[in-house]
Amino acid sequence: MTGAVRTARRRDAALAGLVAVGAGLGSGELVAAFVAPSGGPITDVGSLAVDLAPAWAKDAAIALFGTADKLALIVGIALVLVLLAAAAGVLEAIRPPIGTLLVVAAGAAGVVATATRAQFSPLDLAPPFVSALVAVLLLRRLVRLAARAAPAVPAAPAVPASDGETADAEASALPTGPDRRRFLAWAAGSAALGVLAGIGGWTLRAGARVASAARDAIRLPAPATPAPAIPAGAAFDVDGLTPLITPNEDFYRIDTALQVPIIDPADWQLRVHGLVDRDVTLGWDELLALPLEEHAVTLACVSNEVGGSLIGNATWLGYPIAALLDRVGVSADADMVLSRSIDGFTAGTPLEVLRDGRAALLAIGMNGEPLPAEHGFPVRLVVPGLYGYVSATKWVTELEVTRFDRARAYWTDRGWSERGPVKLSSRIDVPREPVAAGTVVVAGVAWYQHVGVERVEVRVDGGAWQEAELASAISDDTWVQWRWAWDASPGSHELQVRAVGSDGTVQTAERRPPAPDGATGLDRRTVEVR
Ligand SMILES: Nc1nc2c(c(=O)[nH]1)N[C@H]1C(S)=C(S)[C@@H](COP(=O)(O)O)O[C@H]1N2
Ligand SMILES: [Mo]
């Protein structure tokens, strides 16, 4: 093959690589707009690069580019991607399937980048997966078309030099014919579709960017009623014990939303209507101007299994729902508030619970920050003592005052109980690993929101119940930590825990599944003692 032919072939192969990878990324961005509006293949790779970069590199980037460091990062990533894409094309042409493998490896890096994000849901894997898939399929197709457009020229032409064909062999191998037009048409078409997909994804996510910029700009008002100070002795210093306050990024997330609803607070409104004297519509600025309260409340999911992790404790800032209900004037025959989110989810909350003086909030803040998008930004409900499915509507836009015999909520329509008071429960957090014989700290949390935990007891191998030490509770609306010093002897032992409520209720050992109104049974753990 002559140098000119080789150069032409490589140029086409590099083009094939660029188009394939570009169209792959475009497709991924489009998919991301639907399933992962806060992420996307390019930003995820960028975030991973930031996380993995050594401190000196970050410092250098900031020193070099200042506030443009993020832009510099994106430009850097783009350059690396261009080189990688061109290399993948050329390698696929001369040493298949190395180009394919290169793209697969890059796709795998994207998947890892996504899977290691703080708020990860399996659907987030779709964009990097689609990117890699589209890129690989197009790469193979385009490289094949490119090869056909410029067929390999035998090193020693077999054609005798009688009719001048040999002289033309090189010229005909140079890409000019219909095969090359076909290659170029495919490349141009794929590039155009890729760009369209990318622009489409970017445009669809404009709303998400506006909302997240709006969230970044929010300064939460100081509460008129701040949360009472956390009592001394509320948190034990035990390794592996659940922290008293759950950081937002570790807070469990449960909802039916395939795509996190994106709401610009400037557009947010809450309509309160139904069996009321007067409808009220509340806007974001009005809500912020109201006297807000801050309360620690432990939120739990009815689907939480015994010993499960679908529970978290946060300090919520918001306006009392009861005050709002007073404003609209609730009819005497109403007994339920049906809250509705922007995506159609509904929860039915007993009116008496909302008006019995507990800290039922129209919440805008979580642990001192505006609500994270996944936890209901800009506004959600939080009601102490009820499971989330009957009370904790995120992205809430409507409260309808109604009656249980008239309205049904999302999960009650699907076989779950109409009422969902949280059940008395307790969990063992440590020890998690085999331990050495001697004194071993056993610890965990217990909860009975709005009633309170009076006592926690532990037993070993089905023996007598022994009282654990209880930390000071923040309030009856939050979980409480417990610990117990165990004199562990070698062998395999089973630990069990149970709680006793402030109302005298003893946590039942009867095992029942989460449906229809919350799991029961005792958390147990087998521990190897050496
Ligand atoms: N809009 C909306 N709000 C919702 C849900 C939902 O599916 N959609 N799920 C509820 C359930 S079942 C629970 S347990 C809590 C979970 O809140 P979190 O994701 O902030 O922990 O939200 C509640 N609010
Ligand atoms: Mo839930």
Image: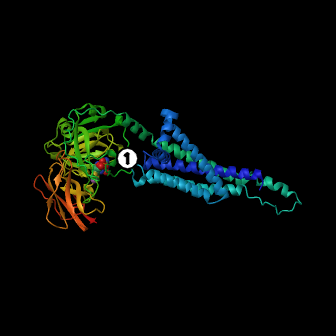
Q: Residues within 10 Å of mark 1 (few under 14, many from 20)?
A: many
Q: Is mark 1 within 8 Å of ligand 1?
A: no
Q: Amino acid at mark 1?
A: Val
Residue 518 pos. (x, y %): 22, 58
In the image, 410 versus 38, the foreground residue is 38
Which of the 4 image quadrants contains residue 484?
bottom left
Where is 219 relative to 77, above or below? above
Residue at point 42%, 44% (across, down): 38
Residue at point 43%, 50% (across, down): 35
Horizontally, is 106 left or right of 222 in the view?
Answer: right
Instruction: State the residue position of label 1.
Output: 260
Residue 417 pos. (x, y %): 21, 57
Locate the C terminus by quadrant.
Answer: bottom left
In the image as oriented, which residue stretches furthest toward the right? 162
Residue 11 pos. (x, y %): 69, 49
In the image, 391 versus 331, the foreground residue is 391
Element marked by disc 1? loop
Residue 387 pos. (x, y %): 23, 52
Which of the 4 image quadrants contains residue 377?
top left
In the image as oriented, which residue stretches furthest toward the front? 438
For the question of whether residue 181 can be seen, the reply is yes
Number of callouts:
1
